[in-house]
Amino acid sequence: MELPDIITRLPEVALPFPPEGMRAYLLQSQEGQVVFFEIYADAYIPPHSHGGQWGTVLDGKVELTIGDETRCYLPGDSYVIPSGTIHSAKLVAGTKFLDYFEECDRHKRK
């Protein structure tokens, strides 16, 4: 599954973690942000926390550790990360997912 042009024409995100092998596109509002992620190489996002986050896997697999629980999410699966909860992720090449962040300034444009 490829993300369509209406998504890939959005501004790219300046990722706060090593961006090798991934690209992200930002849809911004005053209430929050939606970010569409494309993963080209296996990646690891180290433990961190921020405001609330909701996401869904579009393609591939995301292994999330949210607090003390680790779970694999597949296409169609959704997850919620409560505000302030420490979480990390293992991302498999070929994965695509989208996240909604309640903070309107969580990610910056590239």
Image (cartoon, rainbow, N blue to C red):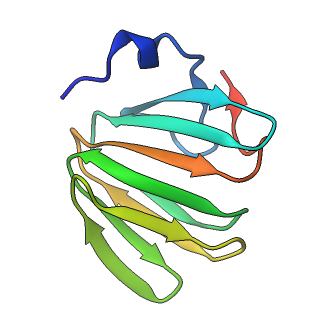
Q: Nearer the viewer, residue 20 or 55?
A: 55
Q: Is residue 28 above or below residue 45?
A: above
Q: Nearer the viewer, residue 38 or 101?
A: 101
**In which quadrant is the C terminus drawn?**
top right
Horizontal relation, residue 58 to residue 50: left or right: left
Q: Is residue 43 in view from this perspective?
A: no
* Residue 68, x across and y down, in percent: 48, 89
Rendering quarter of residue 89: bottom left
Q: Residue shown at 59%/59% (left/top)?
A: 53
Rendering quarter of residue 109: top right
* Residue 29, x across and y down, in percent: 74, 32
Q: Residue shown at 52%/63% (left/top)?
A: 46
Q: Is residue 14 above or below residue 4?
A: below
Q: Residue shown at 43%/75% (left/top)?
A: 65
What is the number of callouts on the image?
0
Horizontal relation, residue 107 to residue 104: left or right: left
Q: Is residue 31 above or below residue 12?
A: below
**In which quadrant is the N terminus drawn?**
top left
Q: Residue shown at 64%/51% (left/top)?
A: 101
Q: Nearer the viewer, residue 13 or 104?
A: 104
Q: Nearer the viewer, residue 101 or 106?
A: 101
Q: Is residue 71 in view from this perspective?
A: yes
Horizontal relation, residue 109 to residue 8: left or right: right
* Residue 92, x across and y down, in percent: 24, 50
